[in-house]
Amino acid sequence: MNKNAIITGLVVFIIAALLPFWINLGGTEAAPKPEISARAKAAGRCILDKYDMRADHMKLLGEWRNSVVRHSNRLYKTADGKIFTMSLSTGVQSCLGCHEGKAKFCDKCHNYAAVTPYCWECHTDPKEINQ
Amino acid sequence: MKKSRRNFLKVAGISALGIGAIPALKAVAVAESQSAPHAIEMKRKDALIAKRWGMVIDTRKLTDEIADEIVKTCRYAHNIPDFHNKPDRKKYPNLKPVKFNQEIKWIWEEKYEHAFPDKENEFLAEKFRKLTFLVTCNQCKYPPCVQACPTQATFKRPDGIVMIDFHRCIGCRFCMAACPFGSRSFNFRDPRPFIEKIDPDYPTRTRGVVEKCDFCAERLAKGKLPACAEVSKGAIIVGDLDDPDSEIRKLINANFTIRRKQELGTDPSVYYIM
């Protein structure tokens, strides 16, 4: 008598525990590829290597923010001698200056990863803002 | 374990040597890290710098038209909202009704009795009563707002400019209570719908942060004078208060100037030529 109840309970538990995995099996989308603009492709290399940028761009932006606001340094000279303006969106030397269109570049991955950075609550995409 | 005096002295001697070698080791380490290529953060070559930024407002040259122009220029240059603007209903369909008792201002027009309440004599030259003064953040040498800020979002730069790190502001408004000049404004709501035309060269603010005049730090960094000074036709002059040969120090030397509420001891950096 007890044996039956235990086995039923176990089966129910295993099904409930594994259900989320079964539901997601095959239903997942591939990670989107951000669109690299022609300008960015021509430049070849971003501020850091591709994989470092992918992993650490938020840390870099945090450093830039402190540098610009706290120490009023606005230019960033990389180890290989390229100069960037430490800005998300102002001028051709900024992030959006090269990666034109934040919808195709920033938002694509952020939406997929379900992260909502609040950069754009204040900073503006010059292409989008006055439309 | 029993330690003999001889062994103890040996260990003590070696330890002392090790501690003595630390500076030498550090020097070597620094030399190594300098030789490897690494990124540098730097200023633009044309950036305007000063030991202590200050401003002189020449009330003799200030007319109502110039004052209006200055306020308007500042408003556009820094994406300051005007709640009397009609927002675009298509872009922002679900806006709450506007409360007109809130306003956001960086530099604004004020009458003598409000700009200098402590200097308001019973009898005063009539021209001063009628005159339009421009008031803004005084970039105090001893800024009470900086002391009040619990997150160090507001801080004083080495060159005297009192700045807000909008990223870091939590909207507690202690700084607004601390400022004796009312120079700070709070974003009670998202300002974007009420900005006539957004200048992409400067960020907007978001709901819940305090803002004020930042002496056009973003323009100084590019080698430009503050926007107000540029359109003031000589009524606003900025420069280095610590440099005795600077234009503003010469002006202060040659003319009678007053400052707002200087008895409070905040040491404002904005001087008014009367």
Image (tube, rainbow, N blue to C red):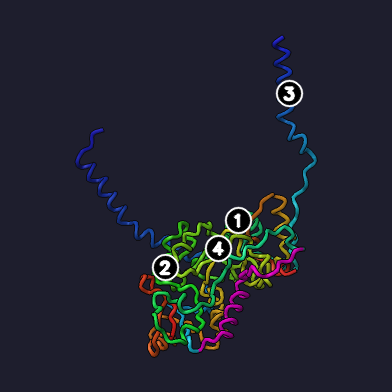
Q: Secondary structure at mark 1?
A: helix
Give residue B188's position: percent from left, percent from top. Answer: 59, 60
For discs 4 and 2, the disc positioned in front in the rendered view: 4
Q: Are the numbered discs 4 and 1 placed on the same chain, yes or no? A: no
Badge 3: chain ID: A
Q: Chain of mark 1?
A: A
* Residue ID for mark 2: B143
- Numbered tag placed on residue A12 in the rendering: 3
Which of B17 and A75 lies nearest the eye of the viewer? A75
Answer with left or right where residue A51 lies relative to residue B216.
right
> Which residue is rendered at x = 39% and y = 87% of the image?
B256
Residue B3, position as x, y percentages in the image: 23, 37
CA gap, disc 4 and disc 1: 33 Å
- Identified by mark 3, the residue type is Val
Q: Which mark is residue A56?
A: 1
Residue type at mark 1: give it. Asp
